[in-house]
Image (cartoon, grey):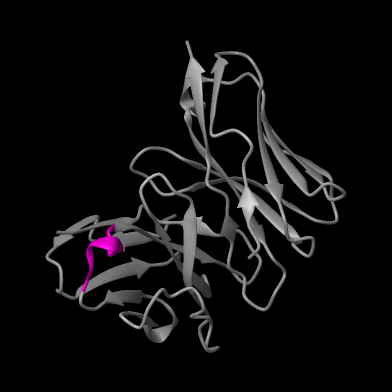
Amino acid sequence: GAGVSQSPSNKVTEKGKDVELRCDPISGHTALYWYRQSLGQGLEFLIYFQGNSAPDKSGLPSDRFSAERTGGSVSTLTIQRTQQEDSAVYLCASSSGGKETQYFGPGTRLLVL
Amino acid sequence: GESVGLHLPTLSVQEGDNSIINCAYSNSASDYFIWYKQESGKGPQFIIDIRSNMDKRQGQRVTVLLNKTVKHLSLQIAATQPGDSAVYFCAENPNDSSYKLIFGSGTRLLVRP
């Protein structure tokens, strides 16, 4: 079956512009996660959605970052007024519920010039 | 803060030998651990997981060992193959209300032909 998909695969933007990254989770998965991976580093948690519960936003690095999940499926991560330090791979994962295996998408590689 | 770390940043093994990748975790309350494999340009791929009520779990050519006494996790790969070359991450779930994963910085496994 289809795995987690993300778009775009690559995004180059200028400093100060806004970007939107999209994640399509595995069908039927109620939990969705966003992580960020800087060059040569491990993954850093950003935000977690579970069903209709309030999301856990504790990992968002600043108020320029926001995310939403519409209809309990597709999620969009928005970064406003991008900065060069936002350059990273943004990874989305989904799972069938809390503390179940998280399956990752291929990521969106963001480069802020 | 709590963290998950790895002892060896790079491990080089001969094809056919067994590989052991180690990981230390610091949160004694963590009750779920996962190993991921990440190839260049791809998202993390699930390998194997283990819950804290177990000390060993086996998969196909892989074994995960959990020592809660010393807060240590290891991944053993039997008969290592060139296709095993990748970066391996351990991750823990700290057993709080969020199901986020905390990742280590990764170990690069290089398989010599």
Say if B15 sits above or below A95 in the image.
above
In the image, residue B112 lies in the stretch drawn in magenta: no
Count of numbered badges drawn on the protein: 0
Measured from the top left, where is residue B76 in percent x and y? 69, 31
In the image, residue A86 lies in the stretch drawn in magenta: yes
Instruction: Specify whether B38 is left or right of B13.
Output: left
Question: Which one is nearer the viewer's eye here, B33 or A36?
Answer: A36
Measured from the top left, where is residue B86 in percent x and y? 47, 33
Instruction: Specify whether B65 is left or right of A3.
Output: right
Which residue is found at the position 64% from the left and 37% from the top? B7
Which residue is found at the position 53% from the left and 83% from the top? A51
Image quarter hosting the N terminus of chain A = bottom left
Quarter of the rendering containing residue B101: bottom right
Question: Which one is nearer the viewer's eye here, A28 or B102?
Answer: B102
Residue farthest along the left direction in this orientation: A14
Image quarter hosting the C terminus of chain A = bottom left
Say if B84 sits above or below B103 in the image.
above
Measured from the top left, where is residue B34 in percent x and y? 64, 51
Say if B109 sits above or below A72 in the image.
above
Measured from the top left, where is residue B30 in percent x and y? 74, 62
The residue stretch that appears in magenta: A82-87
Which residue is found at the position 53% from the left and 47% from the top? B105
Residue farthest along the front direction in this orientation: B1
